[in-house]
């Protein structure tokens, strides 16, 4: 069985969740997580004092489990739920198809295709997502990356 993509490891999904936390609910909707599950997870997370990044991470883990490998008979395949009661067959967990699904959902939820490009590029290079990988594409002569507490942020350079 093929290894899981490094962009789908727990650590990578945690970095992604922190980066897109503001669009976590939209992302869950794009990943076809049922509304009742989204509401329940959001309520539980808020009631326990956790952050929007925490609920986004939990939703990403749920999506990852829901699209996990299904072993049946003599074959294995990845099943992702398109809607209630509908299933769409793919390949194996962590495959390009699964990563592409995540990248498309992130782009649609955030309105930022750059984040999706980072996910796909890191998958192709077999690298995990890191807190600063999302900011590498944002560097320009007028922007300087600033690292604070291990997390990167981009601020306009002062002249």
Image (cartoon, grey):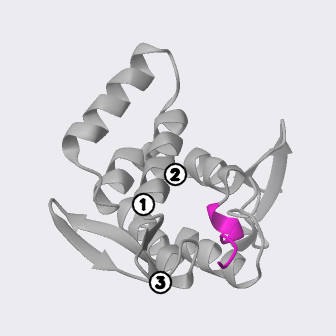
The tag earlier along the polypeptide, 3 or 2, is 2
Q: CA distance from mark 1 to mark 2?
A: 7 Å
Q: Quadrant of the N terminus?
A: bottom right
Q: Earlier in the sequence, mark 1 or mark 2?
A: 2
Give me the residue at 21% from left, 44% from top.
35
Where does the image place residue 41, in percent across and percent down from the top left? 36, 32
Label 1 SS? helix
Q: Let me know if residue 39 is in the magenta part.
A: no
Q: Which residue is mark 2?
A: 20
User: In the rendered view of the protein, which quadrant contains the C terminus?
Assistant: bottom right
The nearer-to-camera label among 1 and 3 is 3
Left/right placement of residue 52 relative to residue 121 reads left
* Residue 7 shown in magenta: yes
- Residue at 45% x, 83% y is 74
* Towards the viewer: 74 or 56: 74
Q: Main secondary structure of the magenta part?
A: loop
Residue at x 54% of width, y 38% of height: 53
Read off the magenta span.
1-8
Question: Circle 1: is it few (<14), some (14-19), or many (20+) Cα within 10 Å?
Answer: some
Q: Which residue is mark 3?
A: 91
Identify the residue under disc 1.
110
Residue 37, horizontal then vertical, whole percent = 28, 39
Residue 19 % position (x, y): 59, 50
Q: Distance from label 3 to label 2 (Cα)?
A: 26 Å
Asked whether the beta carbons under mark 1 and mark 2 sit within 8 Å of each other, the answer is yes
Where does the image place residue 70, in percent across and percent down from the top left? 43, 68
Look at the numbered disc 2 and give the secondary structure of its residue.
loop
Element assignment for label 3: loop
């Amino acid at each position: 069985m093929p290894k899981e993509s490094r962009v789908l490891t727990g650590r990578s999904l945690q970095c992604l969740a922190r980066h897109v936390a503001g669009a976590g609910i939209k992302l869950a909707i794009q990943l076809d997580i049922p509304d009742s599950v989204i509401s329940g997870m959001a309520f539980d997370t808020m009631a326990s004092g956790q952050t929007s990044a925490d609920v986004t991470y939990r939703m990403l883990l749920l999506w990852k489990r829901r699209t996990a490998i299904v072993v049946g008979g003599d074959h294995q395949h990845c099943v992702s739920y398109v809607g209630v009661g509908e299933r769409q067959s793919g390949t194996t967990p962590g495959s390009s198809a699964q990563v592409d699904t995540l990248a498309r959902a992130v782009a649609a939820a955030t309105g930022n295709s750059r984040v999706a490009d980072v996910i796909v590029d890191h998958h192709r290079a077999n690298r995990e997502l890191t807190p600063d990988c999302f900011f590498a594409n944002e560097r320009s002569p007028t922007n300087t990356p600033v690292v604070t507490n291990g997390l990167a942020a981009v601020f306009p350079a002062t002249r």
